[in-house]
Image: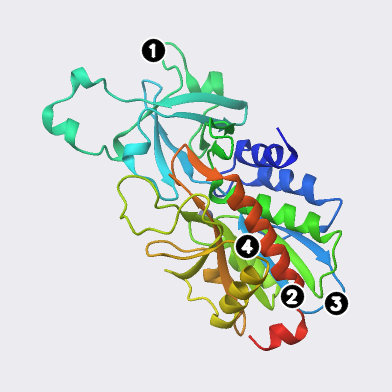
Amino acid sequence: MDSTQMLLKDLTDVMGISGFEHDVARAIEKHMKPFAKISHDRLGSIICKKEGASAAPKIMLAAHMDEVGFIVKQITSEGYIRFLPVGGWWGHVVLGQRVIVKTRKGDVVGVVGSKPPHELEDAERKKVVDIKDMHIDVGATRKFDIEKKLGVKVGDAIVPSSPFEVMGNPKTYLAKAWDDRIGCAIMIDVVKRLAKLKHPNTLYAVGTVQEEVGLRGAQTSAAVVDPDVGFALEVSIAHDTPGFGTDEVEALGAGPALLVYDRTMIPNRKLLDLTLDVATKKKIPFHLASIAKGGTDTGRIHLNRAGVPSLVIGVPTRYIHSHMGIIHRSDYDNTVKLVTELVRVLDKKTVASL
Ligand SMILES: [Zn+2]
């Protein structure tokens, strides 16, 4: 594995659903420490400050550290776990999956139990099972108390289990939690690159908490940073798989997506145009995209104080909010390049003109 693959493995394998991001913050801190000054907001977001040639303007890059997962709701008398979704899930991709329950005593492996097809009535077979009717099995038997023996208790985090892998097409990588560890990795690589280059501003690379449950860490960390410009580094949704239309431009290998619309923000047009110009000038491929049902951290950042010109930049990703997503290496490299070049042109005068 090369150093980028190692970084991506490091960040996607680490477990952290909303409200339980501490291990992710620790992983980011380890990579950022040699290049940036580290602090935190009071919700747990990590703020990595990289000084450039000027104290102003302040540029904020935000990537959320949390991934979608579940939480223990109840333990049945037979030792099965009933659970609540944390973030957006579709029942179809939950049944039969491997999970890790994070208990005070350690990690406990489990599986979301499903009925064998032999036992399904015709009507049952056709419908999606509701998550509230599912259970997790950590090896329950009548005489094994999972609370006493394994330390499982109500409120414990449950995380998808699915390790990083380079696929047969060696440019494609399979992992859980691309949403949004890909953004965390991009931030780290951008800060590393800027350690060797000049930039006319101060950069704040922020790993935010609790995005999947309502952009919460973006709000609190933006209050601390008080940025002049904001970017969310995110996944975008690849539409190049069966089931989407034929004229779709959102594909693996298409380069970074610049979001023209999401449910929580309309981007600053001048910032969008500036980004298009930088991409064109530096010959970085890109495409324009939108997300009709979903928001990003900029939804809160752009509303900080008197308002912050903001934009979302995404890496096309297949199958987000499931155990397994796929990205393309060239999209990752091109996004790192684009964000680095953008930070290098955001001086006082340019930012004042937005
Ligand atoms: Zn996300």
For disc 3, the neighbor class at 10 Å (few under 14, some 14 to 19, many from 20) is: some
Circle 2 sits in a helix, a strand or a loop, which is it? helix
Circle 4: residue type = Ile
Q: Position of residue 138 (x, y in %)?
A: 46, 21
Q: Residue at x 53, y 39 (%)?
A: 176
Decide which of tag 2 and tag 4 comes sooner along the chain: 4
Q: Residue at x 43, y 25 (%)?
A: 111
Q: Nearer the viewer, residue 188 or 107?
A: 188
Q: Residue at x 73, y 44 (%)?
A: 26
Give the numbered dot on residue 284.
4
Q: Nearer the viewer, residue 20 or 153?
A: 20
Q: Quadrant of residue 133?
A: top left
Q: Which residue was labeled with disc 1?
A: 142
Decide which of tag 2 and tag 1 comes sooner along the chain: 1
Q: Which residue was labeled with disc 3?
A: 54
Q: Is residue 276 visible?
A: yes
Q: Quadrant of the N terminus?
A: top right
Q: Are marks 2 and 3 in contact (CB under 8 Å)?
A: no
For disc 1, the neighbor class at 10 Å (few under 14, some 14 to 19, many from 20) is: few
Decide which of tag 1 and tag 3 comes sooner along the chain: 3
Q: Could you tell me how far apart the alpha carbons at marks 4 and 1 are, in whole angstroms?
A: 60 Å
Q: Are marks 2 and 4 in contact (CB under 8 Å)?
A: no
Q: Nearer the viewer, residue 149 or 132?
A: 132
Q: Position of residue 197 (x, y in %)?
A: 84, 64
Q: Which residue was labeled with disc 2?
A: 345
Q: Residue at x 84, y 76 (%)?
A: 55
Q: Could you tell me how far apart the alpha carbons at marks 1 and 3 are, in whole angstroms?
A: 66 Å
Q: Could you tell me how far apart the alpha carbons at marks 2 and 4 are, in whole angstroms?
A: 15 Å
Queried on whether the Cβ of the residue with tag 4 lies below 8 angstroms from ligand 1, the answer reads no
Circle 2: residue type = Val
Circle 3 sits in a helix, a strand or a loop, which is it? loop
